[in-house]
Amino acid sequence: MKQKPLLISLLISLGTGVIAGFLTFTSMEQYQEMYRPPLSPPGWVFPVVWLLLYALMGIAAYRIYMKDPKAKALKLYLIQLAINFLWPIFFFNFGWQLFAAVWLLLLWYLVFVMIKEFAKIDEGAAKLMIPYLIWLTFAAYLNIAIALHR
């Protein structure tokens, strides 16, 4: 294990989440006030889950980087990370819940394709991304329900 590439990979993924969280710091207050469909978790669950998911993303990207630093899969990873970064801004800051739902479906598709690309290089890295895809599926349910309720 090479510590510097792992640290950089974790800083990229976790840093993306921290910056998005900073830019949407009132999001949990907004979440408490909006319609929440059945199965909606309490607000404290989101930062805990996202911390874990960003850590898994960073580890998975590190594994891919160590096997193929120029992999197409890493470009997909960075693209989906940028799409991920923008979602809470669209949803919370701009209040564009319907647009955010469509954006989230785009993110889901990119992550699905990225997992397939990761699997070609490192099956373990691909498996580390599966909880992320599951969470995005759940987030899409929440986002669509909220958007349609408006």
Image (cartoon, helix red, strand yellow):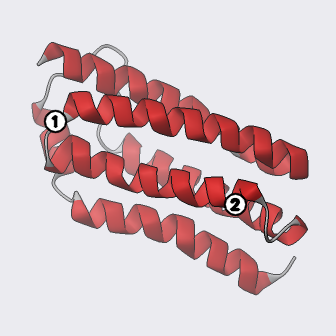
Label 2, residues with CA under 10 Å away: few <14, some 14-19, many ≥20: many
The reply, left or right, for residue 120 in relation to residue 31 is: right
Q: What residue would you read off at disc 2?
A: 74
Residue 117: assigned label: none
Where does the image place residue 45, in percent across and percent down from the top left?
39, 41
* Quarter of the image with the N terminus in it: bottom right
Where does the image place residue 43, in percent across and percent down from the top left?
29, 40
x 39%, y 67%: residue: 18
The reply, left or right, for residue 124 in relation to residue 16 is: right
* Quarter of the image with the C terminus in it: top left
Q: Mark 1 or mark 2, which is nearer to you? A: 2
Label 1, residues with CA under 10 Å away: few <14, some 14-19, many ≥20: few
x 84%, y 43%: residue: 119
Residue 32: assigned label: 1
Where does the image place residue 102, in percent across and percent down from the top left?
35, 29
Where does the image place residue 95, in percent across and percent down from the top left?
13, 40
Q: Residue extending furthest bottom?
A: 4
The amino acid pointed to by label 1 is Gln
Image label count: 2
In the depicted structure, whether residue 12 falls above or below residue 30: below
Earlier sequence position, callout 1 versus callout 2: 1
The reply, left or right, for residue 124 in relation to residue 89 is: right
Res 36 seen here: no
The amino acid pointed to by label 2 is Leu
| Secondary element at tag 2 | helix
x 79%, y 48%: residue: 118
Real-space CA distance between mark 1 and mark 2, rounded to the nearest whole angstrom: 36 Å
The reply, left or right, for residue 69 in relation to residue 132 is: right
Res 107 seen here: yes
| Secondary element at tag 1 | helix
x 39%, y 56%: residue: 85
